[in-house]
Image (cartoon, helix red, strand yellow):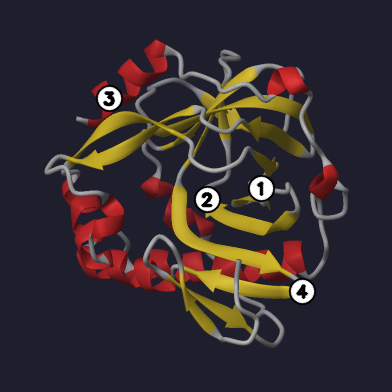
Amino acid sequence: MTDASRDEVVTDSGGTMRRLDGPPSEAVPDLGVLESLRRSAYDVPVRRAGGPPYLAPGDVVTWHYGHSTDVLRVVRDDVRGLVAWLPAGSERLAAMPRDGRAIRDRSLEERAAMAVARDYDMVVLPWLGPGLLRIAPSGRSWSVWYFHDEHDGAFEGHYVNLELVHQRPTDGSKRVHTRDLTLDLWVEDGHTWLKDADEVAAGLAAGAYTTEQADAIHGLAEQARRQLIDARAWPLDEDWEDWRPPEEWDERLTLPRHVVETARAGST
């Protein structure tokens, strides 16, 4: 997916990825300054993920990034974290600009301004591309996504999505709540790339992030390099690259209607 002969590439989403050389810094991010970024349509008691009761293999769970929502099938859930499968074509709830222009057709500055103004509607769209394994280690501010080629199924790389530590409803509802933090890492063929630093900068300029929050997000990327990627910590120390779902688990999933309605009501 990347060109190892270059140090910077433009991604399909319009941002940039920069190859990281040298060891990560010893940055210790202040995650407390990021907690104010949490948004949820659910006003219910929550707990940190990683403790019982656990979800059962085969359960359908909704994964909430604020009001945006994906629907996945549970592969495994225990003290280490949640492993879940997102089948190709599954429904997802995503922000759609009210003027009809796609987000990817806008500059990073326009996207940031739209997010701050909440000038969008929540619409149901399909997950594009092949199915995806997504793993959220307990107590960590990231999840790891396993990408495979949609034609021959070959493993392509790990996508480390920086996000808030996962929370779950205390009533046992099959939901996980977090918030995407824009900045990501891509790991392929022994190289680590920093993705969307320019989008974080646009968010800072638009007021989506404070300076302290932007610094914490960049510090989190260094922490993930040090504690996850370089350390080959879980889940990178297991062979999830070769895992494939049972055939009956690979059918597209639909979002529960009450989840869509609640998210839409909470986003207005």
Q: Residue at x 58, y 29 (%)?
A: 47
Residue 114 appears at what percent x and percent y? 19, 52
Picture quarter with the C terminus: top left
117 on left or right of 54: left
The type of residue carrying mark 2 is Glu
Circle count: 4
The dot on residue 151 is 1
The quadrant of the picture occupied by the N terminus is bottom right
Residue depth check, mark 4 versus mark 3: number of the one nearer the observer: 4
Answer with the quarter of the image where residue 93 lies. Answer: top left
- Tell me if mark 3 has few (under 14), some (14-19) or many (20+) residues whose alpha carbon lies within 10 angstroms of its own: some
- Judged from the image, the secondary structure of the residue bearing numbered disc 4 is loop
Q: Nearer the viewer, residue 251 or 217?
A: 251
Residue at position x 83%, y 62% in the image: 232
Determine which residue is flagged by label 2.
163
Mark 1 Cα-neighbour bin, 10 Å: few <14, some 14–19, many ≥20: few
Q: Nearer the viewer, mark 2 or mark 4?
A: 4
